[in-house]
Amino acid sequence: MRTWNDNRLVFFCSRSPDEIFSLGSGHSASSSERPLILYAYKETENARQNLEFFIHQGLHGAADFVFILNGETDAAGWIPRADNVRIVERPNACYDLGAYGEVLREGGLWKKYKRFITLNASIRGPFIPPWSDKCWSDAYLERLSDDVKLVGMTVNCGPTPHVQSMIWATDQVGMELMLYPPPGASNPDMYGSDHDLVAYGGCYQDLVKAIHAEVGATALIRGAGYNVSAMMAAFENPTYIDDCKLPVDPLYDRQYFGTNIHPYETIFTKANRDIDPLLIDLMTKIHVSSQGGRSWDNCR
């Protein structure tokens, strides 16, 4: 029995990660159909809580998972061993976007898949309502289309509107653009110049360049003639991406039109900014204590 303690609530999960992983035996999909899900991790107390939650709630048998462990950590011991799970341990370099790019380009890994999700340990989830049998990864991937090539949870309006990078979904067309941005794809802003790489294209040496890479990914996709999408309800306004000025960043406390985004709206929640901690604690407690391993049933 695993004890969870985030300094506010203590509660129990009755299944270990390996027990939950064994629930998925027999679930399969052909390699051409299986999405690839990359999870970037850097050791902090909050990140460890988010990783453990993801292991219990997010792992399933209908995708291949790569856990990218950046820097010194013993988190590999928490990740179940299975045929569809791979662990990459690497120096803490390039920030998350650069790390995804290095792993995906290595040996042409990205060419073996048609659909992708990248996410990092700053978010907690997935949170699927008990009345829904939706697979969390399908919820993101199904928003991709011939027109939409980048999906995330939220849009930040500044410095220019962009899909925030804590979780992205894309397909092979979008992935090629983001791994190999064409010349002239970078728009100058307060974080970088038109000569800087964006999206998964570079190894970013400082936070400013990493932010430029995040902001520039949306312009990259749209500049190639495609569109982007986000899970947040406000994005359903068809002109939101072009007109948005507020909230500049909805992932701060009370900055989503005076309130906060509920985890059921975006399936994941930003967990390292002290946004509505009582709600996040309660949601975590409920889902861990009663819904461990649900993704094995929902994702097939």
Image (tube, grey):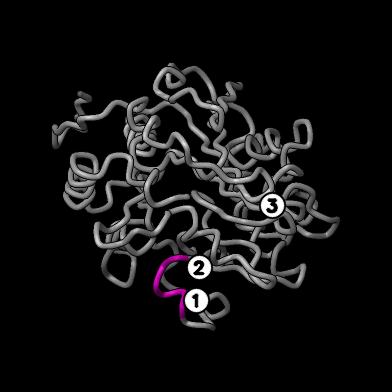
| Mark 2 and mark 1: Cα distance apart in space | 6 Å
> Which disc number belongs to residue 114?
3
Q: Given the image, on which type of amino acid does mark 1 rest?
A: Cys
Q: Secondary structure at mark 3?
A: loop
Q: Kindly identify the residue that appears in the image at 16 percent across and 49 percent down.
A: 278
Q: Please identify, in this view, whether the residue under mark 2 or under mark 3 is nearer the observer.
A: 3
Side (left or right) of 199 relative to 4: right
Residue 39: % across, % down: 52, 38
Side (left or right) of 65 relative to 192: left
> Looking at this view, is 300 or 197 the one in front?
300
Q: Given the image, on which type of amino acid does mark 3 rest?
A: Lys
> Looking at this view, is 108 or 30 the one in front?
30
Q: Please identify, in this view, whether the residue under mark 3 or under mark 1 is nearer the observer.
A: 3
Residue 184: % across, % down: 83, 59
Q: Secondary structure at mark 1?
A: loop
Q: Given the image, on which type of amino acid does mark 2 rest?
A: Cys
Q: CB of mark 3 within 8 Å of CB of mark 1?
A: no
